[in-house]
């Protein structure tokens, strides 16, 4: 679909409404498009204004409500704060009394408790003192008490047993260690056969004897452990010691040459023998020394081991004896303890029982007195506190009631003001709604009026077209009536004006939807100012284009007065078949169709040359500088008005030479002033001639181009409208219509000029001079001149009006 052109100011083109004029049609259409734009802008503006106003109104209303809500919160907060201060001030005194009473209550209870605890403590202290007195007198912990003595003896005996057991185990371990050391040295360690000396019978002396034996044995162990010589005679140390003694003895022997000096050698020079003898002597001496040392070490070690065994045996026997004696002593002392301790325990239990009984009576009396005092305090103070709390609650309730009444009063004032705001807001909305509705109603009326005006104008145009251009069937059925005047237009078909195809043409608001959204508008060629037609199509549009040419030619033929239209038809592709029906006109007057339909290139050149010559005659003879168009000339010419000429070309540029193309452009560009029009079909498949621009034809014609939807008007203001072109009549009707037009055009070539047009006026009678020549007016010569018969000048002396062929009649004509 073609793009919709921007609307123009409808006031820029003023034309009578409903007239079959191109300016009127464009003005009506532009006025509708402008009405669409105005309605869209007005609707959009009205909606936007309504939205902005509603937004502003809602904002102001919301702000007022927020301010009122804030004032309510502030007022309520102020009232609450004031009444809280008043309540706090009024309740603070009662709270002080309650606090003082509670403190007094707590102090009373505390004093009673403290006093009871003090008296209880004194009772407990007296009981403890009495118990202590009894314990002091009959206490088992006293130093001179049997139990204390017996326990001390058992503790001391237990400690001595543990200590002596540790001493004995330590000694046994050291003895075993010494035995192992002597074994490492290779010394004998025969077991001791001593039974030890007899220990003392007294337990303390026996213990001292055991300690003394252990100390002696430990001393023997230390002596054995400090022996160093046995260590030298064991292992590698013995070899080193032997080597030392051998070196110590052998070196002087070798160095002093002792064997030779002792006369053991006869020859002193035998050094090796001397050395060998010296070394042997040193070895023997070393073995002897080591043997002596080993005997000494063995003897000393045996003596020390035997002494250690005797001391260990004495310690063992003393320990055993001490254990026996101490056990017997423990049994004896236990019997003594039991004999003395039982009576003491009995006396102590009896004394303590009497003390506990007295203390229990005193404690019971104290508890009863304390309970009574507490009961009196608990009976007095809670009642006082209850009365104070009740008075406080009443005071708080009174304050709360007064505050609630004040808050309800504020809430009532708030609701009143809020209702007033809502009422004013609703009133403004209603007033605005009413204003908007009035504005919208006026907009709807204006839009309806614009649509109605367009519909009325288009209906008027269609009605004029229906009056001027009768249906084919009616014309064929002897309904053709020769028109007396030139029509203002030539009907081609109908435009469909669909508001839905116009952006914003159909409002979404049901109130602005017109009664008709699809309207019709006639499509026509403005006649005679711009009656040329240019059709462009490919092979698919060729046949429809021929139909458009036929329809346009037939409408021109039936719309103009008979004989006032002469057609030159060029059909090089169809060889005249496309327009053969128009050849029936030649039966009545060959000039109506230029004799035939032209197809050959030279014929086309000749016909275009004839039209060009005709245009030259019109320009030079008729129009000159006196008339702008042939229409003005014909108004003056009257009976001798010049017929209109139409050049029909199908399949351009087939068989068109360069000269023919130039003549065609000249005819298209200048023919309208001379009453010469073109109906041209351009075959877009054909290559255009060299140095030819199709725009030269487009600029002087109404252009229709073939599209997938059919022919579309190429005028920017009409290209967006779907076009339905009028179809030609049926062949029989076609022929009948053409014959009727030809019949009426038969006699139109005979022009009769009324005598009054050539006769002189009465005041001009007998006013001319015929002495030199005679001028006789015979008829009209053009629009402003008379055709005279001039006699008496030169060879113009005679006139032959009637005679046989060749007698000279043509000279007169």
Image (spheres, rainbow, N blue to C red):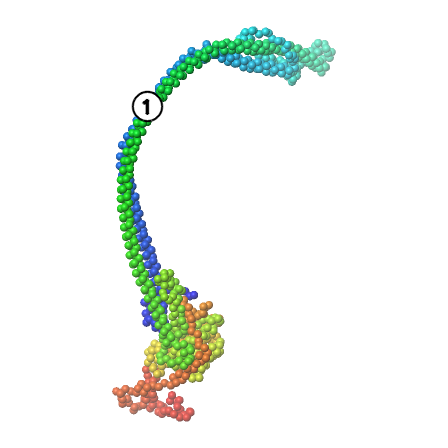
**506 displayed left or right of 394:** right
The image shows residue 269 at horizontal and vertical percentages of 72, 14
Q: Nearer the viewer, residue 658 or 405?
A: 405
Q: Residue at x 34, y 81 (%)?
A: 637
Residue at 33%, 71% in the rendered image: 17
Q: Residue most toward the right?
A: 266
Callout 1: 10 Å neighbours few (<14), some, many (20+)?
A: some
With 356 as the anchor, is 411 left or right in this view?
A: left
Estimate the x, y position of residue 372 in percent, counting from the top left: 33, 23
Q: Quadrant of residue 798?
A: bottom left
Image quadrant where one finds the N terminus: bottom left
Q: Is residue 36 visible?
A: yes
Location of residue 225 by image quarter: top right
Relative depth, front residue between 564 and 410: 410
Q: Position of residue 330 (x, y in %)?
A: 53, 11
Is residue 613 visible in the rendered image? The answer is no
* Rendered view: 398 above or below 383: below
Instruction: Decide if residue 396 is on the left or right side of residue 1.
Output: left
**What count of labels does the image hold?**
1
Q: Which residue is mark 1?
A: 373
Q: Nearer the viewer, residue 452 or 4?
A: 452
Q: Residue at x 32, y 27 (%)?
A: 378
Q: Is residue 458 left or right of residue 689?
A: left
Quarter of the image where the C terminus is located: bottom left
Q: Secondary structure at mark 1?
A: helix
Question: Residue 422 appears at what percent x and percent y?
Answer: 29, 51
């Amino acid at each position: 679909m073609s793009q919709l052109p921007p609307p123009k100011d409808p006031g820029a083109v003023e034309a009578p409404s409903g007239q079959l004029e191109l300016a009127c049609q464009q003005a009506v259409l532009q006025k509708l498009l402008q009405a669409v734009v105005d309605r869209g802008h007005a609707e959009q503006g009205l909606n936007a204004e309504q939205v902005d106003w509603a937004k502003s109104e809602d904002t102001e209303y919301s702000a007022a409500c927020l301010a009122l809500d804030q004032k309510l919160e502030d007022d309520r907060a102020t009232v609450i704060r004031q009444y809280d201060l008043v309540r706090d001030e009024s309740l603070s005194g009662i709270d002080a009394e309650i606090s003082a009473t509670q403190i007094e209550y707590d102090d009373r209870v505390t004093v009673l408790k403290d006093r009871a605890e003090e008296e209880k403590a004194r009772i407990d202290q007296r009981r403890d003192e009495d118990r202590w007195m009894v314990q002091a007198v009959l206490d088992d912990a006293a130093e001179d008490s049997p139990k204390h003595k017996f326990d001390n003896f058992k503790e001391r005996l237990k400690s001595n047993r543990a200590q002596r057991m540790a001493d004995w185990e330590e000694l046994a371990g050291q003895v075993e260690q010494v035995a192992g050391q002597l074994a490492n040295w290779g010394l004998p360690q025969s077991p001791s056969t001593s039974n030890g000396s007899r220990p003392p019978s007294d337990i303390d002396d026996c213990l001292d004897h055991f300690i003394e034996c252990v100390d002696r044995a430990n001393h023997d162990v230390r002596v054995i452990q400090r022996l160093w010589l046995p260590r030298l005679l064991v292992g590698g140390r013995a070899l080193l010691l032997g080597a030392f003694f051998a070196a110590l003895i052998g070196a002087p022997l070798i160095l002093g040459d002792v064997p030779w000096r002792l006369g053991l050698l006869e020859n002193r020079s035998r050094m090796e023998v001397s050395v060998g003898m010296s070394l042997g002597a040193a070895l023997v001496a070393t073995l002897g020394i080591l043997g002596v040392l080993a005997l000494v070490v063995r003897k000393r070690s045996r003596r020390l081991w035997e002494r250690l065994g005797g001391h260990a045996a004495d310690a063992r026997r003393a320990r055993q004896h001490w254990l026996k004696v101490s056990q017997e002593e423990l049994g004896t002392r236990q019997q003594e303890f039991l004999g003395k301790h039982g009576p003491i325990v009995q006396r102590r239990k009896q004394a303590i029982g009497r003390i506990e009984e007295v203390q229990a009576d005193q404690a019971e009396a104290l508890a009863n007195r304390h309970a009574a005092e507490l009961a009196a305090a608990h009976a007095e103070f809670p009642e006082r506190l209850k009365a104070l709390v009740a008075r406080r609650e009443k005071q708080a309730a009174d304050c709360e009631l007064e505050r609630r009444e004040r808050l309800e009063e504020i809430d009532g004032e708030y609701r009143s003001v809020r209702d007033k705001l809502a009422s004013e807001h609703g009133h403004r909305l209603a007033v605005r709604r009413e204003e908007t509705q009035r504005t919208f109603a006026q907009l709807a009326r204006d839009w309806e009026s614009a649509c109605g005006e367009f519909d009325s104008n288009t209906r008027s145009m269609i009605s004029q077209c229906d009056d001027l251009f009768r249906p084919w069937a009616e014309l064929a059925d002897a309904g053709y009536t020769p028109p007396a005047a030139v029509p203002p237009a030539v009907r081609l078909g109908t435009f469909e004006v669909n508001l839905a195809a116009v952006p914003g043409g159909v409002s979404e608001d049901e109130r602005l939807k017109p009664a008709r959204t699809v309207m019709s508008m006639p499509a026509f060629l403005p006649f005679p100012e711009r009656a040329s037609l240019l059709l462009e199509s490919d092979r698919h549009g060729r046949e429809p284009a021929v139909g458009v040419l036929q329809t346009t030619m037939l409408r021109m033929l039936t719309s103009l007065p008979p004989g006032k239209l002469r057609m030159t038809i060029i059909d090089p592709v169809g060889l005249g078949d496309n327009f053969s029906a128009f050849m029936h006109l030649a039966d009545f007057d060959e000039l109506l169709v230029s004799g035939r339909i032209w197809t050959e290139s030279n014929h086309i050149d000749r016909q275009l040359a004839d039209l060009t010559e005709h245009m030259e005659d019109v320009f030079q003879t008729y129009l000159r500088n006196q008339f702008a168009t042939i229409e003005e000339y014909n108004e003056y010419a009257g009976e001798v008005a010049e017929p209109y000429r139409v050049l029909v070309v199908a399949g351009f540029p087939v068989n068109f030479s360069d000269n023919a193309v130039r003549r065609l452009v000249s005819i298209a560009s200048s023919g309208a002033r001379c009453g010469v029009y073109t109906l041209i079909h351009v075959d877009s498949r054909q290559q255009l001639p060299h140095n030819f621009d199709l725009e030269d034809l487009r600029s002087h014609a109404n252009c229709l181009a073939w599209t997938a939807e059919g022919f579309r008007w190429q005028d920017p203001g009409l290209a967006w409208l779907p076009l339905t072109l009028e179809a030609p009549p049926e062949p029989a009707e076609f022929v009948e219509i053409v014959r009727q037009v030809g019949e009426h055009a038969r006699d139109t070539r005979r022009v009769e000029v009324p005598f009054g047009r050539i006769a002189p006026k009465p005041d001009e009678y007998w006013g001319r001079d015929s002495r030199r020549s005679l001028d006789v007016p015979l008829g009209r010569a053009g629009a402003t001149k008379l055709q005279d018969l001039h006699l008496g000048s030169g060879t113009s002396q005679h006139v032959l009006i009637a005679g046989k062929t060749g007698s000279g009649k043509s000279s007169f004509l």
